[in-house]
Structure formats: structure tokens, C-alpha cells
Image: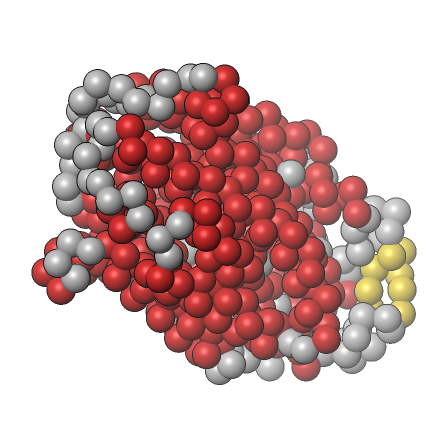
Amino acid sequence: MATTVAAAVDNRIKPRLSFWQIWNMSFGFLGIQFGFALQNANVSRIFETLGGTEIALYWLAAPLTGMLVQPIIGYISDRTWSPRWGRRRPFFLIGAVLASFALLVMPNVTALWMAVGMLWIMDSSINISMEPFRALVGDLLPSSQRTTGFAAQTFFIGVGAVVASSLPWMFTNWFDVPNTAPAGQIPLSVKYAFYIGGIVFFLAVLWTVIRTKEYPPENLQEFEEEKRRTAGFLNGIRESFAGIFHMPKTMAQLAVVQFFSWLALFAMWIYTTPAVTSHIYHTSDATSKVYNEGADWVGVCFAVYNGVSAIAALLLPVIARATSRRVTHLICLTAGGLGLISIYFIQDPKMLLVSMIGVGIAWASILSVPYAMLAGALPANKMGYYMGVFNFFIVIPQVVAGLILGFFTKNVFHGESVYTLVLGGVSMIISGLLTLRVHDADEIRLPAEDKVLRSPAYDAPVERDPRV
């Protein structure tokens, strides 16, 4: 109850932002998703090219860095304020510089250990930028606009991923850039894709840094005293890991939902390339033309599901208003689960695009609805911190995926990666059903047409909850 009242007070003093204000604060996610899409669609391919066989194990580098980086960055950004740079924007920019550098280096690695290490650096850098973006929605938007805010981020994620996932295919088919290379070398089409990604990442995040205005702390003196009292990197680590034991009820319920949905996603990202190349293209030879055609087509498939997610994101607020956010999430995750399961029955590569429609609908919801439900349950002064802790429930399923999916694929499914995708589909449907258990604090509040104030921070109306 205390959390709900705190959120209602927070909602009372926040203005409704305009379309372009929400656009600008979300635009940086276009670049962030360029990085993630290139990573998700091509890193397994790079590992296989460099002779890697334990792909799921190599991917553990990414979640372990995210588990440390996101809560620490959230904790520190909650305690940061600069009249010129704001609270979250300094971390946007630092992460963008580091991630852009990593994207330029990744396709030039020459050994497997270098690729795993660069994945570690790249994922850490992307997380430095990404975590504060989630908190920014909670910072700036009233509860009635949060679904829209996260949906706007999802739109840019979709657009960025469509282009980034397709880049190797586009370079090969539109510009005749080779998509094959001698054994142990990364194809030129993949290299060019990563170079473009590094540039776009930096410029898109820079746009948000320049064009977005943040609110100062309500009481600057109290903020400075709290910052001094809780300052320190080691304190941040301790608080971050302790927070998992003191999280709000809604967050604990969403944690279980996140576990099963992200387990499915990691199964897809890790095993779609080997599943498609072996099950549909009938080859596992990473140097062959057929294998690389299949790997390029996986990039196109990933582009399609991200494109669908960009469109679906625009519809999520409408569906949520007509039903509820919980029902919306259930519908979307069920569509995604069925999409993954359907890959087992496909032999024509073009039919994979139909499967990706369901995955795209699920992806749109995964990137927005849980965060919208969570933001309404969090105290405003710990928004970044808890958003960072919430990342644990993305990291934990990825660690589980790295530890068990390889075993299942090799020993239970006898090397048939497509069965791992089916397992992911079942996991996603379970996640949807578990969403019905989540307490969504915003659902018990009155509609946001009550009264309107004017805010000095923006020339825009501020919603007032009459119960506060």
C-alpha cells in the first residue's frame, strides 16, 4: 500500500510529455538495439567460425557482466545529479563510447578466446547505456504514460534490430560483399555490419543525451545527504545484491515470469543459427556456402521478428486498455511460444518468417509490459536501482541456459538444436500463464483524466490523483 501511495504522489507532480519528448528520450534505444541485434544474430556464427563448439557456455560471459553492471549503474545513477548532464544521461554517453569501440573490434578478433572476451566487454558496455534508459521512463513519465513510454522504446528496438540483423544479408545481396571467408576468418559482410553498428550506436544515444531534459531531485539538500551516506562502489555492490531479498511483491512475481520468457529468448538467440542450418539447410560446415546462406537468413528472420515487434509495440497500449497488461502479456507470449515450436515443422526457409511473426509479438511485450507493471510498484528514489536489480531475472535464465541447454542439446536431443527451440517455446507459454499471478499496482488506480496542473518543468499538464 505504501508503494502505491508513493507512486501516486510521484504521479501527481509529473507532467504528461508530448509525442516528441517521448520520441527523443527513447531514440537512443535505436542505437542500443543495433548493438544487441548484431550481437544476438552474429556472435554464435563468429564462435562457430573460430572453431567453438560449446556455444551456450561461451555466452555466459554476457549475463555475468550484465548481472554486475546493471544494478551497479542503476545504484550510482540514482545518486547522480548534474545541472548540465542530468542523472541518467552521463551513463548513456559513457556506455555508447565503450560499446561503439567494442562493435568496431569484435569482427576483427582472430581467436576464440578473444571473441569470448570481446563479448564480455561489448555486453558490459551496452548494459551501461541500456539500464538508465529503463529508469528514465519511470523518472519522467506519469503512470498513465509508462506503457506508452516503454512501447516507444520497443518501437525503436524493433526498427534498430530490423536493420542491424539484416545488414550482413543486405551487404551480400545488394552490394555483392562476400559472406564467406577462409576457415577461421570472419566474412567481410559481418565486419561491415559491425562497423555500421558502432557508428549508429553512438549517434543515436548522443541524440537522446542532447535532446532530453531530466528533472532535478525534489529536495537537493536531502539528495546530497543521502548520496554522501550511501556513496561508494562496494556499498553499491552490497546494496545491489541485498536488494534481491527486499524487492516489492510485484517485482518478485514478475521475476518468475521473466525467468521463463528470457530462458526461451536465450534458447532462440543461441541455437537458431545451428538449428536452421542443420534442420532446414542440412549442413553444419561453417565454411560452406550453404551454411552461410542459412546464417544470413537467420539474420533476416531476426530482422522480421524485430520489425513485427516495432509494429506490435504501437498496439500494446490499446490492447492493455481494452483488457489489462497481464492479459496482454499472456496473449503475446503464447503467440511467441507457438512461433518457436512451429520451427520444428518447417522445411521451407521462407516459412520461418511466419514463425517470426509470433516471436515478434512476444518480443514487443517482453520489452515493455513487465517494465510498465514494475515501474508502478517502485519508489521514485530507487527507480534506477530496482530496474538494475530486475536485470538479475534476465541474467539468471541466461546463466541457466548456458549451463543446461548445451547438455540438453548434446545429450538429450542428440545434437538436434531444433528441439532446444521447441523447449524454448514451451517455456515462453509457461511464462505467459504465470503473468496472470502478477499484482499490477496501476490497475487499481483511477483513470488519469481527473485534474490537471501546470508544471514549471515542462509546458505540459500534470496529472493529479484525487486520493493523494
Q: Is residue 176 above or below residue 388?
A: above
Q: Is residue 164 above or below residue 189?
A: below
Q: Which of the pair 176/363 is nearer the observer?
A: 176
Q: Is residue 370 above or below residue 232?
A: below
The quarter in which the N terminus is drawn is bottom right
Q: Quadrant of residue 157?
A: top right
Q: Which of the pair 58/211 is nearer the observer?
A: 58
Q: Quadrant of residue 45?
A: top left
Residue 250 makes an appearance in the image:
no
For residue 126, side relative to residue 276 (left or right) = right
Q: Quadrant of residue 40?
A: top left
> Which residue appears at 43% of the width and 28% of the height?
168
* Residue 251, position as x, y percentages in the image: 47, 70
Q: Which of the pair 161/438 is nearer the observer?
A: 161
* Residue 166, position as x, y percentages in the image: 49, 34
Q: Which of the pair 249/324 is nearer the observer?
A: 324
> Which residue appears at 19% of the width and 47% of the height?
57
